[in-house]
Image (cartoon, helix red, strand yellow):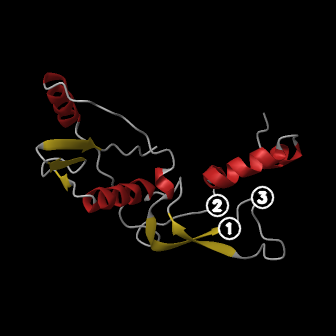
Amino acid sequence: EPTTYREAMKSSHANQWHIAAKSEYKSLMDNNTWVLEFGIDYNVIFSPVIMMEVLRLLLTIAALLDFEVHQMDVKTGFLNGYLEEEIYMAQPEGFKIPGKEHLVCKLLKSLYGLKQAPRVWYQTLSAFLESLGFLKLIKDRCVFRRTVDNLTCYIAVYVETY
C-alpha cells in the first residue's frame, strides 16, 4: 500500500487512488493546508451531542413498545455544510492547477479537519430535519420528533468530533 500521494500515482492503481482521493477529500486534512485562528477564521466550534440518559430512555421506550430502531452513519457529513467564514487554503498536492500553483482556494463548504466542521454539519442536518417537519426536543437539541397520523418518529443525532 502506498503511504503518500506520489507513491500512489506511481503504482499500477494510480487512477483508482486519484479518484478515491478526489471523491473523499481526506487528503486535505493530511496535508495540513490550513491554519485557523479563533475569532478570525472561526468563532463557534461547539456541536451538541445527545445526552446518554436521553439515548438510554429512547432505547428503553423503543424496547417496551416494540418500536423499530435503525442506525446510520453519514460518511461524508462534514463535507455538506456551507461555511459562514471566509477560509482559504493552498491547492492540495495532486490537485494543483498547472501554471496557477501560486493561487489559493476559497472554501465554500466545510472539510474534515476544520475546527468548525462538526458544528457546521450539525446545523446543516438540523435545518434539513426541520424542513421535513421534525421538531427539536426542548431538553435535548440532538433529538428530533415528528408525528404524522398518530405515528411518531424520533431521530437521535450524535456528531463525532474526531
Q: 49 or 146: nearer the eye? A: 146
Question: Which label number is shown at residue 66?
Answer: none
Q: Amino acid at mark 3?
A: Gly
Residue 99: which quarter of the image? Answer: bottom right
Q: CA distance from mark 3 to mark 2?
A: 13 Å
- Can you give x and y, in whole percent of width and height, for residue 95 in the image? 75, 62
Q: Please provide percent x and percent y for residue 19.
A: 72, 51
| Tag nearer the camera, 3 or 2 | 3
Q: Residue at x 15, y 48 (%)?
A: 147
On residue 90, which mark appears? 1
Sort mark 2 into few (<14), some (14-19) or many (20+) by Cα contacts within 10 Å.
Answer: some
Q: Amino acid at mark 2?
A: Thr
- Residue 38 vs residue 91, the one in the foreground: 91
- Dot 3 crowding, Cα within 10 Å, few <14, some 14–19, many 20+: few
Q: Is residue 123 left or right of residue 41?
A: left
In the rendered view, would you say 55 is above or below 97? Answer: above
Secondary element under disc 3, as helix, strand or loop, is loop
The answer to whether the residues at label 1 and label 2 have Cβ atoms under 8 Å apart is: yes
Q: Earlier in the sequence, mark 3 or mark 2?
A: 2
Instruction: From the image, tell me which residue sits under label 3.
Output: 94
Q: Amino acid at mark 1?
A: Ala
Q: Position of residue 60 (x, y in %)?
A: 17, 26
Q: On the image, numbered disc 2 is attached to which residue?
A: 33
Give the residue at x 68% y 67%. Answer: 90
Residue drawn at (15%, 42%) of the image:
151
Q: Quadrant of residue 53?
A: top left
